């Protein structure tokens, strides 16, 4: 069995075209983009003939089995519901939505349709997370006690719809590794805003904070999640990562792709030391790309690769962004459809990973009130 997929949104969406084109279980690939020039440019570059300016054209066309939404965040919920109600499978970039009612509406559409919905969260498919997960599942970290997640990014110069975007409403990159590791959900959060957005950065959102930080408690784990999010007025180059701490070992990652992670292992009691307290050994580790299970045709996309355009322009080297996670995301979405099973990050999981950030932002607006996170 093979499927047809249309990619909607050709900004970030272009990153996924070669992956779908080369996936052995995808027989047709289309693109959707309202900009005529962008549609022509990307279509020519990738040699794709199925081109649409409006997503409704795909939804009304029985030739298409699935749609991957990479449109701006404001469209995620409405487009996801439309795709599912049209009887097609849906993949969507993060976040699932920015309001709790919209999370519920997308989940309800998935139940009505019976089709697959998958939120394409990169953080739980990157090489650093996969390394930490293998280590933790094997008992190498022992019992987890604490987790720090962070996503700092400067959005100056981005399209105007990003002005004043509440950082916590984009929390999934920083928080989802903790929820995935512990097989848990957030039950409540205390969050605070830091700083004040300058007048030209507030936009129409009403959010006053360039930075938000929160403490998240979990349903079936004593681990505390400490999350920091910033989109403006923080002098730091892009960073998106996490550190987690256990009683046997801990892992700290800077969040900069390609940099090593540091693992701290507890030495046996009684090890010679003139100091009080336990001793630890620090190891510098470059997480490996364990690619078992990935279709052979997608393996090259886990690391930087040569892209050969179909329009005759010069080949170039393209980055394998988000720690090589994109091939794994595409394969999981396609495989879940072909195999007739629920994808790893299904609608209920996506809602449970997105809702804590929405509630955290409300907590920060209320001056740090502890607020419950609804269950999905």
Image (cartoon, grey):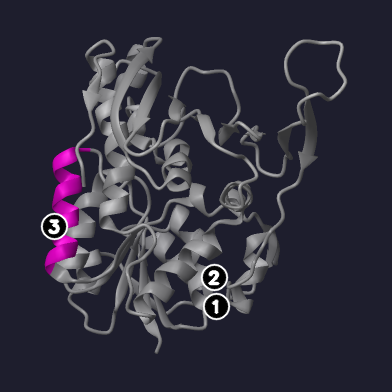
Question: Residue placed at 23% from the left, 33% from the top?
Answer: 373
Instruction: Residue under label 3, please give it.
Output: 108
Residue 259 shows up from this direction: yes
* Mark 2: few/some/many CA within 10 Å (<14, 14-19, 20+): some
Compute the Cα span from label 1 to label 2. Answer: 6 Å
- Which comes sooner in the sequence, label 3 or label 1? 1
- Determine which quarter of the picture holds residue 172: top left
- Please name whichever residue, 267 or 52, is drawn nearer the observer in this view of the structure: 267
Residue 106 in magenta stretch: yes
Residue 12 in percent (x, y) is at 46, 53
Residue 18, above or below 376: below
Secondary element at image label 3: helix
Q: Which residue is mark 2?
A: 18
Mark 3 or mark 2: name the one nearer the start of the chain: 2
Magenta-colored segment: predominant secondary structure? helix
Query: Comparing marks 3 and 1, which lies closer to the viewer?
Result: 3
Instruction: Provide the residue designation for mark 1.
Output: 22
Q: Residue at x 25, y 39 (%)?
A: 98
Evaluate if marks 1 and 2 touch, with contact meaning CB atoms under 8 Å apart: yes
For residue 313, say whether it is visible.
no
- The N terminus - image quarter: bottom left
Q: Residues in magenta?
A: 99-112
Where residue 101 sits: x, y (%)?
Answer: 13, 42
């Amino acid at each position: 069995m093979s499927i047809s997929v249309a990619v909607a949104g050709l900004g970030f969406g272009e990153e996924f075209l070669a992956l779908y084109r080369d996936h052995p279980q995808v027989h047709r690939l289309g693109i959707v983009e309202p900009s005529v020039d962008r549609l022509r440019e990307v279509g020519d570059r990738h040699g794709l003939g199925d081109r649409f300016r409006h997503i409704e054209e795909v939804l009304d066309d029985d030739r298409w089995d699935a749609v991957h939404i990479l449109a701006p965040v404001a469209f995620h919920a409405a487009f996801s519901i439309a795709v599912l109600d049209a009887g097609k499978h849906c993949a969507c970039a993060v976040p699932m939505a920015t309001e709790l009612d919209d999370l519920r509406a997308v989940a309800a559409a998935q139940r009505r349709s019976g089709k697959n919905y998958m939120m394409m969260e990169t953080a739980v498919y990157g090489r650093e997370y996969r390394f930490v997960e293998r280590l933790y599942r094997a008992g190498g970290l022992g019992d987890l006690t604490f987790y720090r997640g962070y996503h700092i990014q400067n959005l100056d110069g981005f399209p105007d719809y990003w002005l004043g975007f509440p950082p916590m409403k984009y929390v999934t990159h920083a928080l989802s590794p903790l929820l995935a590791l512990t097989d848990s959900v957030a039950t409540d959060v205390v969050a605070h805003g830091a700083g004040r957005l300058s007048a030209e950065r507030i936009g129409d959102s009403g959010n006053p904070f360039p930075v938000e930080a929160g403490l998240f408690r979990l349903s079936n784990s004593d681990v505390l999640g400490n999350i920091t999010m910033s989109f403006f007025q923080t002098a730091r180059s892009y960073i998106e990562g996490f550190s987690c701490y256990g009683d046997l070992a801990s892992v700290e990652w800077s969040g900069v792709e390609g940099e090593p992670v540091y693992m701290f292992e507890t030495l046996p009691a009684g090890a010679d030391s003139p100091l009080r307290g336990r001793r630890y050994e620090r190891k510098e580790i470059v997480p490996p790309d364990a690619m078992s299970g990935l279709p052979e045709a997608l393996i090259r996309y886990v690391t930087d690769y040569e892209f050969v355009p179909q329009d005759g322009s010069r080949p170039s080297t393209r980055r394998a962004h988000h720690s090589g996670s994109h091939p794994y995301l595409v394969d999981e979405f396609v495989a879940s459809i072909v195999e007739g099973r629920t994808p790893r990050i299904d609608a209920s999981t996506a809602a449970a990973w997105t809702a804590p950030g929405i509630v955290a932002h409300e907590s920060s607006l209320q001056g740090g009130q502890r607020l419950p996170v609804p269950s999905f």
